[in-house]
Image (cartoon, rainbow, N blue to C red):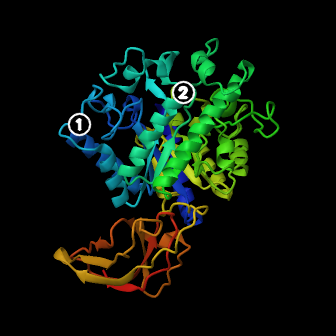
């Protein structure tokens, strides 16, 4: 307890010093600031199974308000934790992590994914639908509802350790999962589809993956001594198909993967990182993520670099540099293990209040790294040393726009026109502008950026300190205190953000006395 208090006091002092030095002014205008919201085992949301719909919605509202207050700009919601659904699926049952019983819908009925999407977009944040592709059960005793795909096809997977998985080596499994992705992309206004690091399961010493039957049936000429290559090829085919299907339906929807933080060790591959990890994405999980990004099968990667600077086997600096060198002109983000701050038995390094600030600064220094995603959301509000407040007061003090999707060609975004301000109820002012009339596509406005400065200043569109807010709809209510002794004039100008995160020119100015 005394140690936590000391660390918190150090953090408060450090926050004050950093804030007074104007660190926020050095923050980039474009930067991923994302957060994972895990639903499996009720890690982040809902706080427990069995909440009614209104309680769940209240928790969503609070989460998104908190994210907005931290100037985060993307939420990665786990909508498919274990071959079930946190949304109204056409293929799979409602998740047990909602009601406590698989197949039981929220009561009263609503669609949590729709609610999250609308809530994120109304707050100027993206929503990426995070799916765990192959996991079926967390524990052997978990009950599957009648009609579950694994009940219909028990030969489609196997138990490995204490968990049950669909077999990536079976073509029908990959096709079934692709249909699920297509269904979500078609019916929901998601900004991205996101897979985590679980493809083939993490290896268990002394236990072989029980896929001999599918290998014998679908080996496509691979010999048994090349079963590892066959497994990687299965995942390759799956990733290629998912990306193609997404782009065929909505080319602007991003597809990203968050792999284990080490692709390969240099001792095993000259192209690998100078690390000594016991497990790697390529050798342990059969995921050749570098191939995927090099060939353009994914729009972004988020390697989970959940280690600290100077870690003896997996140094943060070494890995951040290595992944940046392998971005191949796509977006490369860094996954940070915020859970380390409260993890029992974590390295002493995580008690150092400057570890995560140092990581943020290092990511920002590398032009090939486009920002950070934090695991996971509940850790923002349960950590004990004041890091969340530090983010809010220093590094995330200004808002940031999402990095552009430069490899997809779109039209120029439309500049807002007919900006006007009018007084409404309670002395407030409603700022309004015309929404461009465009068909669904790249140029459709995703967000509007509101810039503001004092009259007499000039807005620098490249400086994030002038970003006042990011909104979904072509209007903004400016609340003005009724009893304000001295009012000031502010200039407002608006831009459009399209589906590729490209930004229009500034609109004409409007001056408001407030």
Viewer-nearest residue: 513 or 287: 287
Is residue 62 something one can see in this rendering?
no
- Secondary structure under badge 1? loop
From the image, tell me which residue sits under label 2. Answer: 170
At which x and y percent is residue 102? 30, 26
Whole-percent x, y for residue 421 in the image: 29, 82
- Residue 90 drawn at (x, y percent): 33, 39
Residue 472, placed above or below residue 41: below
Q: Is residue 372 something one can see in this rendering?
A: yes
First in sequence: mark 1 vs mark 2: 1
Q: Position of residue 293 (x, y in %)?
A: 65, 48
Q: CA distance from mark 1 to mark 2?
A: 33 Å
> As rendered, which of 147 and 117 lies closer to the eye?
147
Give above or below for 247 relative to 234. Answer: below
Residue 412, label in figure: none
Q: Nearer the viewer, residue 15 or 304?
A: 304
Would you name the residue on which mark 1 appears?
106
């Amino acid at each position: 307890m005394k140690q936590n208090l000391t660390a918190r006091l150090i953090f408060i002092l450090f926050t004050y010093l950093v804030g007074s030095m104007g660190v926020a002014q050095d923050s980039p205008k474009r930067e991923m600031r994302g957060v994972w919201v895990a639903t499996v085992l009720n890690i982040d949301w809902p706080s427990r199974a069995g909440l009614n719909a209104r309680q769940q919605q209240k928790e969503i509202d609070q989460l998104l308000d908190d994210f907005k207050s931290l100037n985060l700009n993307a939420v990665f919601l786990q909508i498919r934790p274990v071959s079930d659904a946190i949304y109204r699926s056409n293929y799979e049952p409602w998740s047990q992590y909602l009601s406590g019983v698989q197949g039981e819908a929220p009561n009263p009925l609503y669609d949590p994914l729709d609610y999250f999407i609308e809530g994120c977009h109304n707050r100027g944040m993206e929503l990426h639908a995070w799916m765990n592709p192959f996991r079926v059960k967390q524990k052997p005793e978990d009950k599957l509802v009648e009609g579950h795909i694994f009940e219909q096809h028990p030969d489609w997977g196997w138990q490995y350790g204490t968990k049950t998985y669909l077999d990536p080596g079976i073509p029908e499994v990959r096709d079934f999962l692709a249909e699920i992705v297509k269904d979500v992309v078609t019916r929901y206004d998601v900004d991205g589809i996101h897979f985590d690091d679980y493809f083939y399961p993490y290896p268990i010493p002394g236990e072989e993956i029980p896929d001999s039957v599918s290998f014998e049936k679908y080996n496509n000429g691979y010999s048994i001594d090349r079963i590892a290559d066959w497994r990687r090829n299965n995942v390759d085919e799956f990733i290629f198909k998912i990306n193609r299907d997404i782009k065929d339906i909505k080319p602007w929807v991003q597809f990203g993967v968050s792999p284990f933080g080490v692709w390969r060790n240099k001792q095993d591959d000259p192209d690998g990182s100078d690390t000594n990890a016991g497990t790697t994405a390529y050798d342990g999980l059969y995921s050749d993520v570098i191939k995927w990004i090099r060939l353009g099968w994914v729009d972004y990667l988020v390697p989970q670099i959940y280690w600290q600077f100077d870690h003896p086997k997996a140094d943060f600096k070494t890995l951040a540099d290595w992944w940046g060198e392998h971005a191949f002109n796509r977006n490369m983000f860094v996954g940070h293990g915020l859970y380390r701050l409260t993890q029992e038995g974590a390295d002493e390094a995580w008690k150092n209040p400057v570890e995560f600030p140092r990581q943020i600064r290092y990511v920002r220094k590398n032009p090939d790294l486009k920002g950070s995603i934090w695991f996971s959301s509940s850790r923002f509000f349960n950590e004990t040393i004041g890091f969340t407040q530090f983010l809010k007061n220093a590094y995330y003090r200004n808002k940031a726009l999402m990095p552009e999707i430069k490899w997809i060609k779109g039209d120029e975004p439309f500049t807002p026109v007919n900006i006007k301000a009018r007084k409404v109820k309670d002395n407030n002012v409603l700022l309004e502008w015309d929404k461009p009339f465009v068909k669904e596509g790249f140029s459709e406005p995703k967000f509007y950026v509101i810039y503001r400065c004092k009259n007499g200043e000039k807005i620098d569109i490249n400086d994030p300190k002038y970003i006042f807010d990011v909104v979904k709809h072509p209007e903004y209510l400016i609340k003005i205190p009724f009893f304000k002794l001295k009012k000031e004039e502010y200039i407002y100008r608006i831009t459009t953000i399209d589906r590729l995160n490209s930004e229009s020119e500034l609109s004409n100015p409007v001056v408001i006395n407030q």
